[in-house]
Structure formats: structure tokens, C-alpha cells
Image: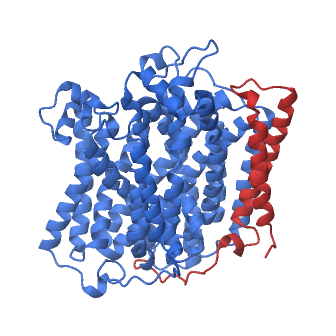
Chain colours: A blue, B red
Amino acid sequence: MHFVPISAVMMLATAQLTHLAPIDIAILLLYFAMVIFIGFYVKGSTNTSEQFFLAGREMSAWIAGLSFVSANLGSLELMGWAGAAYQYGILATHWYWIGAIPAMLFLGIVMMPFYYISKTHSVPGYLQLRFGEGARALSGVSFAFMTVLMSGVNMYSMALVMKVVLGWNINFSMWVGAVTVAIYVMLGGLRSAIINEVLQFVLIWAGAALIPILGLIEAGGWTSLKAQIIARMGDPAYMHMWSTTGSYSSNPMGVNWTGLVFGLGFVISFGYWTTDFLVVQRVLSANNLRAARLAPIIGSAFKMFVPFFVILPGLLALVLLKDSAGHLIQLYPEGSDMVVHHGMHSFNEVLPLMMVRYLGPGLLGLGITALIAGFMSGMAGNVSAFSTVWTYDIYGAYINKKASDSHYVSMGRWSTIVGMAVSVVTAYLVMHAASIMDYVQELFSFFIAPLFGTVILGMLWKRASKAGGFWGLLCGTASSIAMWLMVLHDKANIRFMILQPHATADTIMRVQAMAANLYRALWSWCICVVVTIVVSYMTQPKTEAELTGLVYGSTVIPHDGSTNIFEKPIFWAVVIATILFLLNLWLW
Amino acid sequence: MTSQPEAPHPQPVDPSTEQSLSIWFFVGVLMLGCGLIIFGQGIYEFSHPGTTVLANLHPAFWWGMLMTLFGAFYTIHFRPGKG
């Protein structure tokens, strides 16, 4: 998610940043040996479709929660957002806080009971139960298509990063990554992917947390860092999260608070965290309703501290990243003349540059292993979700409806291999036409906001009809694509999306692609909701009996087994929401 | 599979203790292995100082020690056959 501004990651850097010592290679090999071992070890307990696709629904709240947050903690994200922090300042934190936490809490408290009680295997599966085959087919096919493409993008990004940072051959990195992921996901399914995501989560914290710690020591603490950044940039907006978002032209991102609150905080964030099956699948693996509700809440607590090792390194680099002569290194936008023709570093290189600055042999190996684990986990997450949606919502729904359970498990294993093969092809396509990477990342944004409109109305509004759900989803998606094409054709058209038809050229220029995405998501969601409501009132609703277990008001939510206040998910959701509020106030 | 098959009753168990090797055991072994390697490098750097910024604080030594302790605790606490 999150529209990572990492198009053609470091595509044109000229020389490798560093090299690994034997001790670093040892750490990398230890990680690879462990993930392959886990694949073979777990294979014995993935014999049924429930075990292969949903890890047997046996995961505790902590494991499901860590896996849930880790599925989103890919290296593409880490590097992209560290670069965004360097470029836009502390505003980038919004994508981790208001752009994630409220949605995660909402998933745990409001939506999870419906996903869990309906016993659905996937989000398209829920749409089938609620809105019928049309909505499932639309959502299942688009999701399957996107996941294999995203897996390919991850694969190519990993190979490119390894080439730029370490000088490794691109083909070697891609194939090693692809074969390793294919082996452990094919053997162990979701269970194997989840175990590796938990390992990746720990590795990323261990590998990346030292950079902000050492950075803060070098900068002389947080207060001193703030003062240095404001002095260097000459603009306090770099260190404020909300106070400069009153207008498009008073902050480095060109964003208004309405876009942040409604576009990012509501539509995009809720769309991604509550309806993207890649992350929801992790929570569906929980072993009971309370664990399923607690998992996203636990995930949100960890998510809140991710800016510490993603955003902070980007900010630290603004004042600490210096060359051997002690001069500040200036980073430039991807694809700019300084990067392309003068061999300067780009924004997206900020995290590897900070790693090289502080991490010596051993620690550097740990950091590089964490990055590789993040990329591989991204591939595995996409491929395991693809395998589930393909087998349950496409193959099992439309091609072979009456096969045995073992046949579907075999199909799951084979579709993993096919998914990885398609990913490899995608990776090679991206290698030859870097702009494909931008388009693939945009694909997610086409579907996710309208999908949230359809799912949330399906869960909370009994009157939503089968036809309403389908047409709402279709129109929302089509409008999102239309808006994207409109801006691609002429950036000036963005003035209609921000509701300022007479906006000046300067205002239009300041609205960055990320801000434009917020408004596109918001409008496509609104169109989806309006069409769903209008069509629903024109068509026959489902009966009360058909809605049982699927919709608020027709479903008795069973008690989740909490015996005291500290076991109640709502208690922890309130605690986390309070901390989030205080953090925003602190950095206002 | 057009309509979704009845899922088996979820098992009220934590896989971290149900299987002979727990997820947390894997976490412990990985952290212990990495921690020992980095800790060893940290000791070596007392006699052969590193060239990175703030190498004088011996981050490899302290971070390696922390990871080793964390990994050892998880490895021992979730070792196979315990409980």
C-alpha cells in the first residue's frame, strides 16, 4: 500500500555503496538456511486446505498480529518512506500513524467479527457470501492479477537494491530470491509465510533500530536534531505534522489536512488495512475470535513505532549525512538530472547510506539480511495470498467446483510455483521498462478504495443489495482509473480533484503525486458508496436469513471469552488510540 | 467450493507450543546465531577499531550482546520438548 515513491529504485546509481565481509555473508547464509529448513519442517502440518491456506486457523493473537503488521513492512516501503522523510520531513509519519492505526483498530473492533464468524477464506469469499458471484469475480481476478505483479516488482526491487548496494548480479539475486520463496511457500503455505514474517519482523527491528539510536547520539538528541533540521531547511514545516496542513502551499508535500484525514486516514488506510486480503489473511489465521480481534490491535502498537527506524533515519540524514571531507551530502529526486547524469545519490538511497554510515561488519550483514528478508517476505505474502484467492475464488469457484480437499491443496502448491514464475516474468519486464513499476504500484490504488466502500456497506448496511454491491465496486474502480488517466494526460486536471477549479499553476505544481492519490481514493470511494446506495434502493434486498453472520444488525456477535478488562480488545484499542493522539499532539 | 465449505472447529491452542518446534524457538535461534557472530566481531573490534561513524562506542559489542541474551532466552524458553 502507501504508494511508495520508489519508482525505479536507485535505477541509475553508478557505483556500489559497500561490500559485505565474510562475517556478513555468514549472517545472510544463516537466514537462508533457516527459512528453507522452516519450509521443509512445516510441510508435514499442511495437508488440508485449511492448514495450507489459513495456517489451520491456529495462530495466537501475537503471532497473527506480528505477521499482520510484518506483511506490510516490506523493504520497498522502508526505503521509500525513509526517502520520503528526507524529502517531505516529518509529514511522512502520517502514512504510519493516521494512515494505519485507526484502520487497524477499526478492523479489530468492528470488522473482524464478521470476517471471522462468516468463516470466509478470503475477502473475495466474503463478497461472494454478501453480494454474490459478480462482486467476488471482479475482486478475485483483480486481486490475483495484482498480487503476482507486485511479487515481481518486489523481486526486481530486491535485485536492484542488491546491485546498487553490494554490486550483486541482478539475475543471481532474482533467481535466488524466487527459488527460495517458491520452496518455502509451496511446502508450508501460509503457515510457512507467517513464520517467516515473524522472523522478518524481528530481523528488521534488530537490523534497523541501531541507526536511529546512533543517529540521535551523533545529533545530540531530539531537540538538537529538530533545531538543526529547521536551520538547514529554513522552514519549520519539516518538523510539524499538522500545523502546516491548513493550505496546499504551506507544507513540503503540498497536502491539505482534508486529504490527510479523509483521503489517507479514512479511505486509503481503511481500504488497505481492512480489505486487502494480503494482510487480512494473516488475521484470519487466528485461533479464536478474541485472538482475531486482538491481532490487529497488537499489530497497531508495533506499527506506531515503525517511524522510529524508517522516518527518523530520513530526518537524521538531512543534517548528518556527510562525505569524507565533512560536507553534507545532498540527495536528489529519482530520475533527476543530478542522479542520472552526475551520479549523485537519490532520496531512496537514504536508508542504505545511513546503514553504511553507522554499521560495520556483522551489523551491516544484519541490516542487509533484514532488507532481503523484507523483500522476500513481500514476495511470499503476495504469492501465498495469490495462491489462496486463485484456488478458492477462481479455480474452485469457476473451473473445478467439486474436487477433493487434497486436490485443492495440490492446486495451492502448483499455483505458488506458477505465481512465482509469473512474478519472474514481471520482474524481467520491469527490468526492461522501469515505468511498469510505477503502473503496477498504481494498480492497487485503483481497486482498494472502492473495495472498502463495498465491504463496509456490506457489513454495516442490511439494505445493500447484490446488484448494488457489484455495480458500486465496478463504478468506483472505473472512476479511479478514469481520474488517474485524466491526471496522467494533464497534471493541471488535478485542480478538479482538489475542488479548486481555479487553482494557480503554483498550487497545482505543489500537489505531489502522493497527495493526488489521496483525493483520487476519496472520490472513487464516494462514487462506489453512492452507486451502491442508489442501485440497492432500486433492487431487491437479501432476506434476513441470508444476511445472518454477515451484516451488523442481523448477526449476534458471540462473546469473545474475555474475563476481565485487560483481556478485552476494546480496552487496548482505547489505550493505543490515546497514545496515538498524544504523539500527534506532541509533534503538532 | 462455490459456497464456502464448513471450516473445521478452530483449535484453541497456540502453535508456538503445539508443535515440537515453536515459532519463538526459530526466532530465538536466529537471534542467538546472529548475536553471537556480531558479539564476536564486537570483541575483535576492541583491538581492531572499526571505521564507521561512532565506532568508538562499540555498537557491535553491545548490540551483539543484547541480541545474544534475547536469542538465548527465547531459545531456552521455547526449546523443543519443554512443557
Residue farthest to the bottom, as pictured: A545
Tell me if A315 is positioned left or right of A456 in this view. Answer: right
Q: x, y (%) of residue A529?
A: 22, 61
**Residue B19: quarter of image:** bottom right
Task: Answer above or below: position of A35 versus A260.
Answer: below
Number of numbered tags placed on the structure image: 0
Q: x, y (%) of residue A407?
A: 57, 74
Tell me if A105 is positioned left or right of A517 in this view. Answer: right
Towards the viewer: A79 or A372? A79
Q: x, y (%) of residue A430?
A: 48, 37
Towards the viewer: A191 or A64? A64
**Residue B45, visible in the rendered structure:** yes
Towards the viewer: B53 or A129? B53
Q: Residue at x 24, y 52 (%)?
A: A524
Q: Residue at x 25, y 59 (%)?
A: A474
**Residue B11: quarter of image:** bottom right
Task: Answer above or below: position of A12 versus A430.
Answer: above
> In the rendered view of the protein, which quadrant contains the C terminus of chain A?
top left
Tell me if A178 is positioned left or right of A366 in this view. Answer: left
Q: Residue at x 44, y 21 (%)?
A: A231
Q: Residue at x 42, y 59 (%)?
A: A577
**Residue A447, visible in the rendered structure:** no
**Residue A250: quarter of image:** top left
